[in-house]
Image: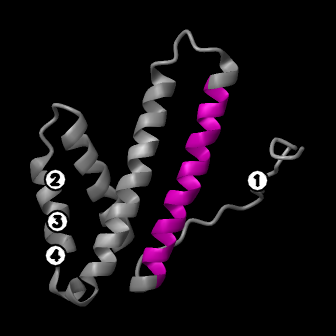
Amino acid sequence: MKMPLSEILDRYTITKLKLERTNEDVSDELRTYKAEIDNPDYVEKSDQIASFIDRLYGINGQLWDTEKDIRNGIDMPLEKIGKLALKVRDLNCKRNGIKAEIVDAFSEGFKEIKINYKKIDYGKNKR
């Protein structure tokens, strides 16, 4: 089964972060994703792909950092852990939005659809 480009780009950026931020050798996995990205079918849209990679790399980096903060927060107040968890949720929403754009741009893959989910502003930004 062929993996959709949205998943390949997402996994490529996560693997790139793992290579940069850990001692784990994931170079073979990274090369495999890169070979898929360099597929001749995508040559005409290589600039668009590069933009998606940059955006996913940024979001996935923020997710990595936030999840690390949660894991390291053993003595952290629950309120702060909760705020970090909400940040992870919001970053994942942005990440899924980028992946949905890739699905639209390349007409392959699937969009994640949230059912019965509504973000509510409980007055945090009101004065």
Residue 11: image location, x then y, percent:
31, 56
- Tell us which disc is closer to us: 2 or 3: 3
Q: Earlier in the sequence, mark 4 or mark 1?
A: 4
Name the residue: 27% across, 45% down.
17
Where residue 38 is drawn, which disc sits there? 4
The answer to which quarter of the image holds residue 75 is top right
Q: CA distance from mark 2 to mark 4?
A: 14 Å
Q: How far across and down, in percent of the image, does residue 92 sit? A: 54, 52
Find out whether residue 11 is within the magenta segment: no
Task: Tell me the element at label 3.
Answer: helix
Query: Of marks 2 and 4, which one's residue comes earlier in the chain?
Result: 2
Instruction: Decide which of tag 2 and tag 1 comes sooner along the chain.
Output: 2
Distance of mark 3 from mark 4, alpha carbons?
A: 6 Å
Give, as a three-letter code, the residue at label 2.
Answer: Glu
**Real-space Cα separation, disc 3 to disc 1, in angstroms:** 35 Å
Mark 4 to mark 1 CA distance (whole Å): 37 Å
The nearer-to-camera label among 2 and 1 is: 1
Q: Quick one: 26 or 44, which is closer to the camera?
A: 44
> Residue 40: horizontal and vertical position, in percent?
15, 86
The disc at residue 29 is 2
Q: On the rendered structure, is 6 left or right of 86?
A: left
Magenta span covers which residues? Answer: 81-104
Q: Is residue 104 above or below residue 112?
A: below
Kind of residue at disc 3: Lys
Residue 123 lies left or right of residue 2; in this view the side is: right
Q: Label 4 amino acid?
A: Asp
**How many C-alpha atoms fall within 10 Å of the one at disc 1: few (<14), some, or many (≥20)?**
few
Image quarter of the N terminus? bottom left
